[in-house]
Image: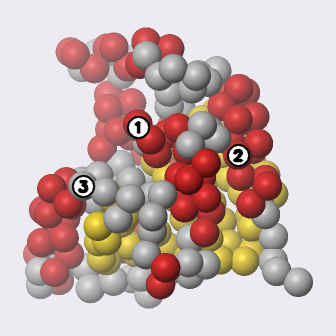
Amino acid sequence: MTIDIGTGDGRAVLDAAAREPATLVLGLDASAAGMVEASRRAAGPARRGGRPNAGFVLAAAEAPPAALAGAADLVTVRFPWGSLLRGCVGLDAKVTEGVATLVAPAGTLELLLAPCGRDGLDGVPTGPQDVVNAVRCAFEPHGFDLQAGRLATSAEIAASGSTWAKRLAAGPERGDRSRDADRSATLVRFVRRARR
């Protein structure tokens, strides 16, 4: 099972479900409104993009359903904002713990983070190495070992399937998107230690 936390409009879930039809892919978000269209599409017929292996869960990252605890082989967080971003960098312990609980032993946690100084995110690091260090400090105590921490490649950003990935890929030549030209994306990947 794969869980995408803070899935927003659910595009990433539909893309992952299409790529991996044998895997259950769940999107989890605290706002139902953003997931409505993707949920409708997933429930539709296959010839119209229906994805029977995709589903959506209304829940906050700090309070995920207990039934999902330790169930996901892969948990992704892609370009979060607000409390989810703060939790990913260790500034909201309840969110950090909620995200961590979803990953199965020997499972992977993958984060794509793109905070920028002009976002006005008090206390959130913005430099790639500072982001990696903050995320490592947040998740290592929950039983995770860092596997990668670096700038994300264009291919990794595009493969995320998120709406923010499209914004970052558009670059400065696309009108109002120029304000994101100096925003870099940091990839941080962990593997959860297997229980003994």
Q: CA distance from mark 1 to mark 2?
A: 17 Å
Q: Quadrant of residue 181?
A: top left
Q: Residues within 10 Å of mark 3 (few under 14, many from 20)?
A: some
Q: Nearer the viewer, residue 104 or 62?
A: 62
Question: Are the two marked residues, 2 and 3, in contact with CB atoms closer than 8 angstroms?
Answer: no
Say which element carries label 3.
Answer: loop
Residue 161 makes an appearance in the image: no
Mark 1 closeness class: few <14, some 14–19, many ≥20 residues within 10 Å:
some
The circle on residue 91 is none
Q: CA gap, disc 3 to disc 1? A: 13 Å
Q: Nearer the viewer, residue 153 or 34?
A: 34
Of the pair 24 and 140, the residue shown nearer to us: 140
Q: Which mark is residue 138?
A: 2
Q: Which residue is mark 1?
A: 81
The quarter of the rendered structure image containing the C terminus is bottom right
Q: Amino acid at mark 2?
A: Ala
Q: Residues within 10 Å of mark 2 (few under 14, many from 20)?
A: many
* Amino acid at the residue labelled 1: Trp
Report the residue at 51% width, 20% height from top: 122
Q: Is residue 62 left or right of residue 102?
A: left
